[in-house]
Image (spheres, rainbow, N blue to C red):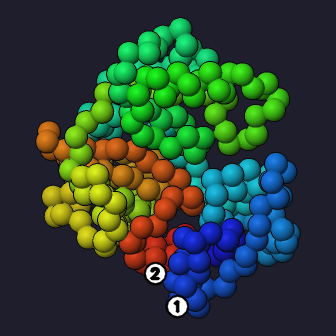
Amino acid sequence: MQWILQDFEDTRKLAIALDRLQIPYTWHKVVPFVGDLSPEPVIADKNTVVLFGSYTLWRYARAHDLMPGVFRIRPFVLEEPWQQFLLNGIQGQFMRLNEIPQKFEDDNTHWFMRPVEDSKEEPGRVRSSREILELAHKVLTLDQNDIPNGSLRHDTELMFTKPARILREWRLWVVQDEIVTYSLYKEGSRVIYRPEIDDDALAFGRALVQANPAYARAYVVDICRTDAGLKMLETNCINAAGFYAADLTRLASAIDGLI
């Protein structure tokens, strides 16, 4: 597999794992607003190329027909096999950003908000109704043509759900329907990265993967423990998701084996 890396703190960690496995890679920068790579990579075989870095790399991969390139995923909230397990999702409200001023009141209610698509336009987090309205007004004052790719737009579809009390959160890396590594990344409100997972949480993660096989050749799924038990938080594009305390040697080996 030919590995193309955008220079970030996380991809530097990935590079250490690739060195350990004696897998070659090249470093590149993304040209702002254009999406080209600098330096331009020399592609040996379009069918054996993978890119890691920012989510916008999918545009380069698509434009140059690179496979597997970037592993695109469908909106997890619309995946019927997972809906019964979701913490935030099917029970929530869905609306486009330009609908917010008509549907939200400045009443200090708090909501968990995130884009429906895995587009990285805005991170999912809890916001007050006032923050949501301010964000919507800020975006809506911009001309659509002036909004850069990868940013919230007037018609971005968003999901809103009531916040829940989360006790622990884990990220699981899935390749070919197998969990190859995992990491704890939050305990309560405290961010903490450790390469560990509770036995029942790992079993829950495996059950999620088995419930929706072939969702993507490779992806990330975040799960959590709540007062109501184990729940699914979201999926993310594996090429652009933070690594936390994952075993990157195992992850790189699994992805390199997809040839």
The answer to whether residue 8 is left or right of residue 30 is left
- x, y percent for residue 128: 41, 28
Q: Quadrant of residue 157?
A: top right
Residue at x 76% of width, y 71% of height: 28
Q: Is residue 119 left or right of residue 200?
A: right
Helix, strand or loop at mark 2: helix
Q: Quadrant of residue 206?
A: bottom left
Mark-to-mark CA distance, 1 and 2: 7 Å
> Marks 2 and 1: in contact by CB < 8 Å?
yes
Q: Residue at x 29, y 37 (%)?
A: 87
| Residue closest to the eye, 128 or 90 | 128
Q: Residues within 10 Å of mark 2 (few under 14, many from 20)?
A: some
The circle drawn on residue 38 is none
Q: Amino acid at mark 2?
A: Thr
Give the camera-side residue of 227 and 174. 227
Question: Is 6 situated above or below 104?
Answer: below
Task: Give the SS element for disc 1.
Answer: helix
Q: Please give left or right for residue 185 compared with residue 120 in the image.
A: left
Residue hosting label 2: 249
Horizontal and vertical percent position of residue 55: 63, 53
Query: Which residue is nearer to you in this view: 33 or 181?
Result: 33
Residue 102, placed above or below residue 173? above
Residue 93: x and y, percent? 41, 20
* x, y percent for residue 24: 66, 85
Exactly how many numbered labels are in the figure?
A: 2
Residue at left offset 20%, top offset 50%? 167
